[in-house]
Image: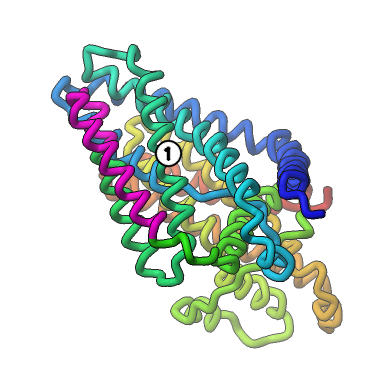
Amino acid sequence: MFDDKKLWKDRAVHRLKEFGVYLRYILNGHLMVVLLFLIGTAAFYYQNWIKTLSLNFPAEIIIALILGIILTHSPVYTFLLEADQVFLIPLESRLKGYFLRSGLISLVFQGYILLMFLAVLMPLYAHVSVNGFQSFFIFFLALLIMKAWNIAVNWRIHYYVQPSVYIWDMFVRYFINVLFTFLLFSNANILFLLIFAFILAFYYFSFNSKTKKMGLKWDLLIAQEEKRMASFYRLANLFTDVPKLKDTVKRRKWLDLFIHSISFTQNNTYLYLFARTFLRSSDYLGLFIRLTVIGAIALYFISFGAGQLVFSLLFLYLTGFQLLPLWYHHQNKLWIDLYPVSQTYKTEAFHTILRNILFIQTSVFALVLLIKGQWMFTGIILLTGLLFSYLFVHFYSKKRLKA
């Protein structure tokens, strides 16, 4: 006999165990020490920045815009698998308890994230408000109710087929969330919040009544669940091998100019392979772009040279460390071993790719300081970054890959 409680419990326990296994590798990595240093430095600058703000600073608007994003992004963690499209669709009418538990566990996890963001933003609010931190728990309770509403609405939207419905719902809910959060932090009259509650109820029940006779879009739910897990697997893959990780490749024709610069010779076989892999894989190229942009923004706002030097080296290290899995990207493909090319060329090719990537990132960081007019530190960071990149590639990466 089918038991939805047992099915949900088995799926949830298995997923949590899987998270626990990989989190042990992630939290034990020395990369966490670097990240903690970055968080501590960011907190120091954040506190100093708050002290410079006037009492007329529009903190409520800034908080509302940020928390609006956190509230609007409210997926339901269903723990569905690809095979469920075959075996569970006939039992959809008996899975209400299963999906209700998924909604509750989603609220718990996302409520924790919401709590973290609220804790970060409260010092900004306390700086411009006479209430200080006194309203923290009231704000959190109100925002948690708002998060539950977003999760419920997001679930009802998954009964629709049209992509336009998802887009419009995202925009409408973001506007509602921002407006509600702004009124909440502006200490608006309770009457306005009660009126808002009627609007929220009407919005949900309008979708609820329209979707009662519709069926769930299982393919979309499963695709979203796989996408979430793929993101976690990519993170865990930086610290250990993840067998379940699926490669995502995208053709980027506009980047072919970098490939065309590689001469068509046997010695460049692996150089061509690694270059193609880096440019076409969303994992590596996306990671490089994100860290470069974040590092450049951080360097632009940091005022003293020692901090700029430390930050530039930290981001170079983060980039290089997280690109090391590129070496193992094709290790399970047997046809790679059939190349009539010495393994020495493979090692040289990987070092060349990694070194060039770090050199490019160093140049971007130096360009940011050049734009700021800091000529001396531009040269220091450029020379230091190039030296660090060389040492990282030819000494640290060799030791790391052998280990």
What's the residue at 82%, 80% (across, down)?
A: 335
Left or right: residue 61 compared with residue 325: left
| Residue shown at 45% from the left, 47% from the top | 152
Q: Nearer the viewer, residue 225 or 169?
A: 169
Give how far across and how far down residue 223 sits, in percent: 59, 64
Instruction: Say which residue label 1 marks.
Output: 147
Which stretch appears magenta?
180-209
Please name the predominant secondary structure of the magenta segment in the image. helix
In this view, which residue lies farthest toward the left?
A: 56
* Image x and y of residue 177, in percent: 31, 42
The residue at the point 42 percent across, 24 percent down is 119
Return the x and y of residue 235 as percentages of the image width and height: 64, 49
Say whether residue 403 is left or right of residue 56. right
Q: Where is residue 254, by image quadrant?
A: bottom left
Looking at the picture, the colour scheme in use is rainbow
Q: 57 or 188: which is nearer to us?
A: 188
Crowd around label 1: few <14 · some 14–19 · many ≥20 (10 Å): many
Where disc 1 sits, the SS reads helix
The answer to whether residue 4 is above or below residue 279 is above
Image mark count: 1
